[in-house]
Amino acid sequence: MADFIKNIIIKIINRYPLIYNLFLVKKSIKEENSYLKKLIKYNYDIVINKDVDRKDDINSTLLHKRWKKPRVIKNRQDEVRIFMAGLFSDNASPYIFEYARKYDVIAFDISPYYTFLKNNYEHIKTKRMLQDDMYDSIKRANSIQQIDLIWLYVSNTEVDSEFLLKLRIFGAPVAVICMDDKHAHFTKKGSIPNGQQPLIGSADVFLTTSIYSIPIYNHHGSAAYYYPPGSDSNMFYNKTLKKDIDVSFNGQGYGYRFSFIKSLEKK
């Protein structure tokens, strides 16, 4: 029944794309206004004043409340052992692995589980299976050689707070990264768990691509660092192509992104 209704909606969208675009714009404005109201609850003086020293001092203090520095510092990158979990079968994987190749990396791909994680009926079973498989993979890697960092590109959709707390038994700091927490931080209503907020307090440090998310993590007592997105021109720059687009945006249209794209059009 659900698939039947879904197919009808898709047909309507394909037939009336302009109406659907208007709906998306209205929805994005509503999301943006809702998010801004939530941000008012938090102290943004650190970001507004750009007091970097104070911000770094807060995060360093919060981090070392949970994690103690190792006695031996490794000087070579290839000696640092990192367990990485994320969607490594998508278009981002070549860049991630190219960068990670400098280290001793054990990669765990979430992609095979992802379709079922988005299914209301399969979510709970798949999430439990994903967490069990990931834990076993970390345990095996750690038994061979001590892991120095557990780096997870996840949200509450993929893992829960209890799972992250369980990983502390391995002694390595647990870092959770989110590329969308500026507009996907708070839990949205729905049957499938989502957002980063439910995970706060479970990981040692959070990495974010938005400076405006840092005070939210700090407010709840968690360390957070700005993890800027980037690109490698050696990998993505094709010199044989002629430039025919001045500015382009590649991504989904939601949250604040509509207003961002509109501002690009005016420049």
Image (cartoon, grey):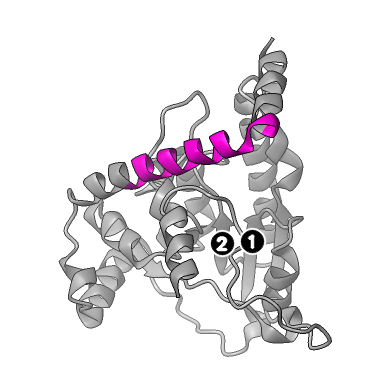
Density class for disc 2 (Cα within 10 Å; few <14, some 14-19, many ≥20) is: many
Query: Where 150 falls versus 225 (above or below)?
Result: above
Q: Dot 1 corresponds to which residue?
A: 84
Q: Position of residue 152 (x, y in %)?
A: 56, 56
Earlier residue among tags 1 and 2: 1
Quadrant location of the N terminus in the rendered image:
top right
For this view, does 217 lie left or right of residue 129?
left
Residue ID at (80%, 83%): 241
Give the prevailing secondary structure in the magenta stretch. helix
Q: Which residue lies furthest to the right in this view?
A: 240
**Label 1 is placed on what type of residue?**
Met
Q: Which of 108 and 2 is in front in this view?
A: 2
Binning the other alpha carbons within 10 Å of mark 1 as few (below 14), some (14 to 19) or many (20 upward) gives many
Q: Residue at x 22, y 45 (%)?
A: 37
Q: Position of residue 190 (x, y in %)?
A: 47, 26
Q: How far apart are labels 1 and 2 at the CA level?
A: 5 Å
Instruction: Judge by depth and name the residue closer to the eye, 62 or 138.
Output: 62
Is 215 covered by the magenta stretch?
A: no
Q: Mark 2 points at which residue?
A: 151
* 23 within the magenta span: yes
Task: Tell me the SS state at disc 2.
Answer: strand
Front residue (pair 36, 62):
36
Q: Nearer the viewer, residue 22 or 181?
A: 22
Location of the C terminus by quadrant is bottom left
Which range of residues does the magenta coloring cover? Answer: 14-32
Image marks 1 and 2: residues in contact by CB distance under 8 Å:
yes
Identify the residue shown where x is 40% and y is 64%: 210
Mark 1 falls on what kind of element? strand
Q: What residue type is labelled 2?
A: Trp
Is residue 193 among the parts visible in the rendering?
Answer: yes
